[in-house]
Image: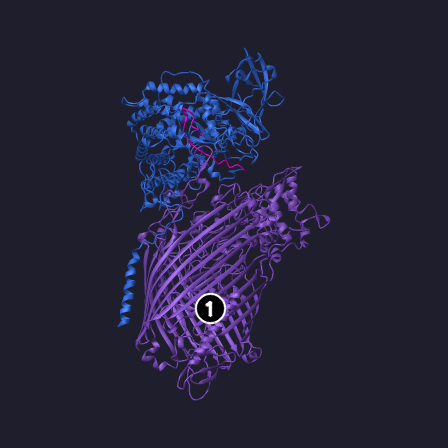
Amino acid sequence: MHLFRKRIKWVLMLMFFSISTSMIAQKKAVYGTVTDEQKEPIIGASVVVKGSKGANVVGTITDIDGRFTIQAANNATLVISFIGYESTEVKVTSQPVINIILQDKSIQLTDAVVIGYGTVKRKDLTGAVSKVNMNEINSVPVSTIDQALSGRIAGVNIIAADAAPGAQAQVTIRGGSLSQDASPLFVIDGFPMENFDMATLDPKNIESIDILKDASSIAIYGSRGANGVMIINTKQGVMGKPKVDYSYNFSMTMEPQMPKMMGPYEYVKMQQEIATKEGTSTYSIFKSMYLDNGKVGTENIQRTLDSYKNEAGYNWPDILMSNAPMKTHNLSMNGGTAETKYNLNFGYVDQTGTLLNTSMKRYNAQASLEQRLSKAIKLQFKATHNNITTKINSVMNNMRQYRPTSGIGGLDLLAAELDNDMTSGGDLEYGIDPSIFVNPLQQAENEKNIRKQATTQVNAKLEWRFLKDFIFTSSVGGSFINTNTELFYNSKTVQGLLQDIWTSKDKVATRILNVNGVNGLIDNQDVTNLLNENLLNYRKKFNKNHSLDVLLGLTYQYGEFKTQTLRAINMTPEFEYLGLYNLSSAQAFTSSAGTQTGYNGSSNQLLSYLGRINYTLMDRYLFTVNFRADGSSKFIKSNQWGYFPSGAFGWRLIQEPFMKGLKSVVSDAKVRISTGTVGNQRGVNDFSYLLELGQLQKFRAYNFDGSTLINGLAQYFYPNPSLTWEKTTEYNIGTDWSLFNDRFTLTADYYQRVTSGFLMAKNIPYYAGYFNGSNTRYENVGNVLNQGVELTVGATLVKTKAVTWNVNVNSSYNTNKILDIAQGNDVLAQSFENNTVWIAKKGSSISQFYGFMSDGLYQYDDFYTNPNGTYILKPDVVNFKSLKSANNPVQPGDRKYKDLNGDGVIDDNDRTTLGSPIPFLTGGVSTNISWKGFSVQAFFQYSYGNKVLNYNALKFGESGKYWNRGNMYESFANRWTPDNTNTDIPRILEYTGGGDVSVGTPRVTDKFVEDGSFIRFKTLSVSYTVPKKTLSKIKLANLMFTLSAQNIALWTNYSGQDPEVSNYGGVNQKRGTGYTELTNTTSYSSMTGGMDNAAYPRSLTLNGGVNITF
Amino acid sequence: MKTKYFLQLIILVLLLSNSACNDDLSLISTKPSLQVPSEALMNGMLTTAYSTLTTDRSTYGYGLWGAINGCDTDESFYKDTKNSEVNTIGLHNCNSTTTTHIQESWRAFYQIIESCNIVIDMAKTVKMDETKKANMVGQAMSLRAFAHFMLAVHFGPVPIKIIPTHLMTNLDLPRDPIKNVCAFAVKELRDAVPMLNEITTTRTTTYITKSVAEGLSMRVGLFMASHPDIKDSVMYDSVAVWGKQLIDRNVHDLNTSPLTVTGGSGIADQLPAYARIFIYNMQNNVAFNPMSESMWDCSFFMKSNLTGTYASWNSSYVNWLGSYMGVDCADGDYGKSKIGYSATHYRPQATLWNKYAAGDLRRDWNIATYAYKNNFDNKPYKYISDTLPAAMGTPSIDKRAKLLFVVKGEKLVDETVIENGGSGYTDGTWEMKVVGYNNIFIPSTSAITIAPSSGTTGTKFNVVVVGGSIVSVKMVGASASGYMNVYSRGIGKWRREYEINYTSPREQYNGSCNFPILRYADVLLMTAEAALFKKGNQGATIADGLVYLNKIRYRAFGKRVDISTYDLAYIQDERSRELCFEGVRRMDLIRWGYDKYKAVYDKIVVDTKVYGSDGTDNSTAYKNDAGRNSVGNNEPKPIYAIKALMSNYTKYSLMPIPNAEIGRASNTFYQNPGW
């Protein structure tokens, strides 16, 4: 705070200085007000005497009533400007009072668009670059920017994993590749970052988001840009009076609708059916749990199946989910003079999840200062700290699965029965799953899974203008990301459960059901990136017709990461309340399985030369040539350097004489063509070429003398000296139109991009002799083609003094195809439980679901009945290969599959492709109506042509006893039984049957690969800005109230909760750490989308906010 | 003008610095890497190479004495062989596509080879003491040669891989003929001999020493000399020379003094000298004793105790010796066993039992004579009672009788072989009752099997004692109870009761028994064999061979029972008597050729009929374990376990190349014939 005050003082002092400078140049006082078209005063508009520059600048800014006073000579020209308005020039006449009305900028033709290492006016843009409308984004009640962005930008596909607080979204630009990480390169305030998590940013502090999509724009980022580049710049000081802005938002996310699970009656009935199947011992356990005399409350009653009809049971989702509040505060101060500009920002978000004990908290702080030292030299400093803490748990699945009868006072006597079983000396039921003892409420209350990520970025930049047309900028910066995960499972959690058992009647021993006992994990990852950039810019207009902008640059980036992992198991349960402070009591360091401590680290560096020439001829023909040479330490010496050229041509038709007649209709028209080659070295590990001997595991140790273990070093990851970055060559044709005085705008792009040599782990012969389990080596194995069309249309339908109505539509169409892959072999990707879910095939999309075709159920007609009542499948009916000679043959009511290869049996060869999880049409529609102080914004998002695998339905709707004593969807009551054969839900399987007939995991089946197309009414927001006149009375510069709603309605054929889902990754993926670290087992890529497995559901969020500017 | 100059200058500077694109941007890895080779790294890699011999069940933790080498022989069979298993691989309880034994064994040997390749490659640049370096490189060369040889024995033609993978541009390697692989191995081993330390320096049996390389070169050499497809008969001469050199150097000798040791039963046992090496194995004793018989042991340390320092280590790194192949102990209760659980999955063939002459102490060590009852009782239960009816008298232990029940035909027992009638019994005809358990013949995991008693139940036998010695044992009363025969016994070579340094409770299956890869008796036998066939004048003679063989016999019988002549057939049987279950029989039979294998098979068929089922009975008793296959297949398991090999010798004498490998090296790999 002290520093803060000091800084304000300094800023004020500098302002005073600048004002006094203008007094020296005094000629004559000119007064006036600056207002907008609605006559509302504009505060902080800059009024500068034209021609005054640098240290001698004469200028001022308007005050709270839009008034200004300036000293200017007669005939001097005043330049009045303010962000979002067209600048105006006014000649000083003998009139002492000048009132100025600034016009809204409807079309931002002269807006600066951020391109790599510079900006360009939109009209001069030759590449495909999308700019995000930050005004729209900021009215959306979300805690993280990625939630607001999806569907808003053509060509950018943002799929949130789910709605868990702080969950990171997967971003792909113009389709993906099959490589490990398909997300774009993020450039945060000039700092290129891989594997960046947008959720760490404070949306309120973002000035601009620009997305580079085509090769000509990307090429300036060389070896790292191939997946597209997302440039995010945070707010900077603007010249003007100090503007203090405070906003507060309160929102409430409503308890989501959860699928209906079976109630007690149906559940117990199902358990009875299972127990009957499994034989007498299981049945007797069932019976004592559910049917025998049992104490209900204080009463001892004889229970029957019907007793459960009137029991409400426990609706776990309902118990665990609730309405969840979120609070957001943001305070910023911004201002400056021509010499000094500053911006300070503080943000705080406190979000509670709809699921018990899940939350997200984020602190953001930023300070930036820009100081002009002389006419030639400007210095800029920026420091940002983002700190995000997310808390999640693993209950989302368990709360569906957990039996509705359990719990305090319930009718379920499971725990008592097991105690009894053990007291009587019986063995604990074989294969008992500790999760049956822990209800999801207890789990949620006790599980600790906390992830903290702290990002600090500091930056200093020097800008030196010399020799009139040259600008030299040099910057140094550092980015430090610390990701810390803490897990703690006490004895009340499934993962740390301890259970007393009786070895004999009088002997009690604490036996751990979970061999790890009370356990915990601390994982800490530090990523440091250092950057130095030196740019030389030459800008010159030679005469009216030639304009040249040349950029040369040299950049150097150094990155290193370190991880430390500490896992402790079997901590003393007596002190478990100490949490991780109890760590030292663990046996972790002396015994037991697995790696207990881990340390890893690596580093890389990148040296780059870059150049760009923008040449404009007659303001009509635009030429861009880009070049970048990247040298990366990730490769062997001979492969370190890569060269990435690109070029673009733009033709501003509007400037052609033949367009002159159309001027009243067409206000701008441009055609763009570009091509280039870019790289992606993301999939390449540091030291990819070098054999690093690792895995100091005890298993490599050897006992030479009979008593001492000597550690061994092993060859583990295959180095590949010939590895190189994957290369993407792209062609883009685009056009920009602006009609009817900018009332309608259109941008359309067609692109074709071929990614060659994409990186994948390839199986290599075992005789190569390494120790990694999959025995794979990263190689450049194949080529992918992406092509698509992007369309963005904007229209100002109504524009009167009182009312403005805008509509913006964006749409992108993308298809992709594997041209070549791993010598023509298909690549399969697995998900949970090693279940194969996806396939990548040559000639098809980069990802398709892969599985069986359902053919109804086996019915009685398919069988001969034996005299003893058993069923024998008729020989002409298709059978499972694995069941041909098995003791448990296929039975009526089992799911039947199509024998696609016609060999008479069902096995893995009968799988086929079942559609792609990648949508081919995505986009959104936003509309904005403003009337006086009111503004209404609505946003619709859509996705078409994508499939979603409803894994929940596979688990909870289909496969009988998939978990021992697990609950199922209510719809499962309509399963096949001898009395209910006319159904498509199979019979119950024995527990040993597992997920499906003869397999332990459910079969991926066409029935569950559903159309995931949707339209979502995502946002509706109404805001009211109090008129400035009213405000001036209460001494406020601005006051705005907002009411908004998010996730309002969803139209889809998908039968699950939400088709916008992709939660393959699980809860502890090391994402967003600022570093790409590959292992041989990583399989998260754009291949593994569209998986709906107990996702954290989205629901309606209502929000109210206030924004005050002092 | 000035502007122009400046611009040009800047461009020039940038262009010049652009030529810096040739700069090496490499960083130094913070991990141990080949950027900076060192002695420590070489040591680490060599340790891993040794360790990999233990790091999978498919090597010396199980496969090389069990799944892969414990079948197809006249020594042992896998008693859980099932009718549905239709080929050798199935009989080995593994399967060519899914089970990992074959694939993992393949991988493990190539992992050893690669670690050694890296050591040898690093040695080119690492500066260190040259003697030390030579010793390390010598070990790497020997290990690499041994791994290649093991691959050739099991898989036939395999790639010789001596270039480290990280230096290869094309990863496709052709399969080299067996002959070339063996020739490579012999050369490497011989080249390594002068580089290696003597065991008198290393003082443990875990390192590859001079004599180990010599011994291994003899093993490969003999394989080359005798294998029908190689027939490199010059190798007989070489082996005779190398053998004599090694023997005459006098650094090894047989253990000849008996051993007194207290096992799990708590009773101090007097054990034959022959047992000493295997007790040492079980006790992780790798110390070099003067004139050590052990030459190279594969050392295990990972006991997988439930608690304690090495608790719950991955079971891939422990040895199943003693449990999968061991003395029956029915105590399957996880974590409670006092003696050490064993389900005796591997069983001796009667053919092996038959090979032993009376008085050969090795028989009752190799084929266990007792089982353990359960976890409450450490007492060993002998398969034949030494608590006959009290009235018979109780001679001292060394005078007691030894009987073997022989199952033959429909009736459970109609013949009892009296191995040794004993002395000191009271003359007369006595009634003895033998109680079996659960109609099951042999110790099963469920309970104790046989409890001979003089009680009122059980099968009645009349025991006739004449002159203090049992002369006849005849069953007189029918009973459904079962009796022991050879097939029902466990393999007693490595006995878990002698394990030391474990903490209670003990893991059910996992132990840390060392495995003897090479020992001196083998050297004596190999030299004697080579002496029979060598052409030249160098090296060991047949006379020398006789000396070597009598040395083994002396130890076997505990006294001098010399032979004065020997032939190949004698060697073939003696190797089995001495080295049974040590993972070399299958290799031996293959190198002696199809005819020998056929003879072995025929013998098993005969022996099984004498000592086991006659192939007609389907009664419950025969269906269990060692008896018969499940319904529908009349083949007794001891026959069934080798039958597939004989049905298609070309195919089954080699393992299949793992399917995954053929897919991964599709340009150069092909499947072995018949698979």
Q: Main secondary structure of the magenta part?
A: loop
Image point (67%, 53%), residue name: A309
From the image, which quarter does the C terminus of chain A lie in? bottom right
**Is residue A863 at least partly visible in the picture?**
yes
Tint of chain B: blue
Q: Is residue B440 above or below residue A418?
A: above
Q: Is residue A81 in sight in this rendering?
A: no
Left or right, B220 with respect to A368, comes to left
Q: Position of residue A375 (x, y in %)?
A: 38, 73
Q: Position of residue B554 (x, y in %)?
A: 42, 18
Residue sticking out furthest to the bottom: A94
In the rendered view, would you say B420 is above or below B498? above
Q: Quadrant of residue A327?
A: bottom right
The residue that disc 1 covers is: A235
> Would residue A443 be found to the left or right of residue B261 on screen?
right
- Does residue B659 show up magenta in the picture? no
Query: Residue A815, position in %: x, y?
Result: 40, 62
Question: Please, what is the three-letter code of the amino acid marked with disc 1?
Answer: Lys
Q: Is residue B301 magenta?
A: yes
Q: Which residues are magenta?
A: B286-307
Q: Please name the residue shown 57% across and 66% down the image.
A: A251
Secondary structure of the residue carrying numbered label 1? loop
Q: What colour do you see for chain A?
A: purple
Residue A547: x and y, percent? Answer: 31, 74
Q: How many marks?
A: 1
Residue closest to the far top: B467
Q: Looking at the picture, does residue A173 appear above or below residue A781?
A: below
The one nearer the camera, B351 or B567, is B567
Task: Identify the image's colour scheme: rainbow, by chain, secondary structure or one colour.
Answer: by chain
